[in-house]
Image (cartoon, rainbow, N blue to C red):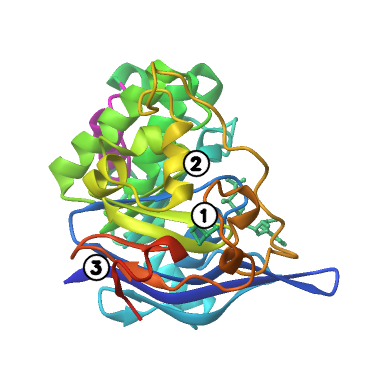
Amino acid sequence: MALLSISSLTVEYQRAGRTIRAVDDVSFEIETGTVVGLVGESGSGKSTLALSLMGLLPRNGAVTGGSILFDGAEMTGLDEPEWRTVRGRRMGMVFQGAMNSMNPVRRVIDQVAEPILTHETDMTKADAADRAGELLSLVGIPADRHPAYPYEYSGGMRQRAGIAMALSGRPAVLIADEPVTALDVIVQARILQLLEDLQEALDLTILFITHDLGVVARLCDRVVVLYAARSVEEGTVEDIYDRPKHPYTRALLESVPNFSRGRGKSHGIPGAPPSLMDPPAGCRFHPRCPRAMDICTSVSPARSRFTATQTAACHLYEEEAGGDG
Ligand code: ATP
Ligand code: SF4
């Protein structure tokens, strides 16, 4: 059974009297113990989706449609005290800014112990410190560095500490929003390895959010591709990397050096993602799509199912594949 089931999720912001639909009718599921990658360019709605899963949308944002079922319970509509019983406990979050959001004047071990004391009220300070030390060791920080201050850590170590904090409530689901984006390539690889090891050791369920298709191949079981607030393709890692259907997924792959065809050359996707204040009619990718047809400029494509594991929303396939409703 799916641990997290997101169906027709819609999230909107209000800004300057206008509505920005940052997540538009997005559906996918995450089975227990699996890793799903949520991939898309900047502004496609990835962080908004992550924040809605954690009940952390800013005041001008709200879930306006659809459902988030976590372990069978509906999350949309929870009030803040109810969210506090879920967030940080059953759902942990690691984000790009985790390494910058640590308190500079508190020792790392105390910062990891703090959420443990908050979540497990019957725990003593000494027990919480022991557990924090275990978590820091688990993420690869040697014991003699546990009492250091954040500024004494490298970026990679601070991100490891951020992961330790996210694990402090023994979460069933870890939502990792661009957790390696600010790191150099070698440190990125180590943090990805750490997440892979932790996933296996703790049987974690992970939603891994990134703009870079190149980093999800090793870690993820399934991939959901977002474009301009909508899910355009979903499949297993093999579906997405070996037989991508949607022209946007193909363009994303072409922009990853290791995956691009043609003597290792890569190129960015021409044009820029649209503003969600005023998105294009029809298929939102049509102004940038090399295969756009007349119909694409006015009619939004339905989702087609190719196999039990792969779907995409593109007019190119509507007759070839079965409709998916
Ligand atoms: P990035 O990787 O750059 O963070 P993203 O894919 O995570 O991009 P979001 O940050 O979720 O995308 O943004 C989706 C859309 O929602 C964008 O158009 C953005 O301008 C808008 N948006 C995000 N936060 C707010 C906010 N607090 N108020 C109004 N609009 C917002
Ligand atoms: Fe391109 Fe049309 Fe498919 Fe959109 S629906 S991705 S514009 S071919």
Is the residue indicated by label 1 positioned so its CB lies within 8 Å of ligand 1? Answer: yes
Pick whichever, 27 or 251, lies toward us: 251
Quarter that holds the N terminus: bottom left
**Magenta span main SS:** helix
Q: Residue at x 54, y 54 (%)?
A: 47
Q: Earlier in the sequence, mark 2 or mark 3?
A: 3
Q: Position of residue 20 (x, y in %)?
A: 70, 68
Quote the CA–CA distance across marks 2 and 3. 24 Å
In front of the other: 199 or 44: 44
Q: Is residue 274 left or right of residue 216?
A: right
Circle 1 is placed at which residue position? 46
Q: CA distance from mark 3 to mark 1?
A: 19 Å
Q: Are marks 3 and 1 in contact (CB under 8 Å)?
A: no
Give the numbered dot on residue 3: 3
Which corner quadrant of the image does residue 318 belong to?
bottom left
What is the x, y in percent for residue 244? 33, 47
Q: Is mark 2 within 8 Å of ligand 1?
A: yes
Which segment is the magenta one? 128-141
Q: Earlier in the sequence, mark 2 or mark 1?
A: 1
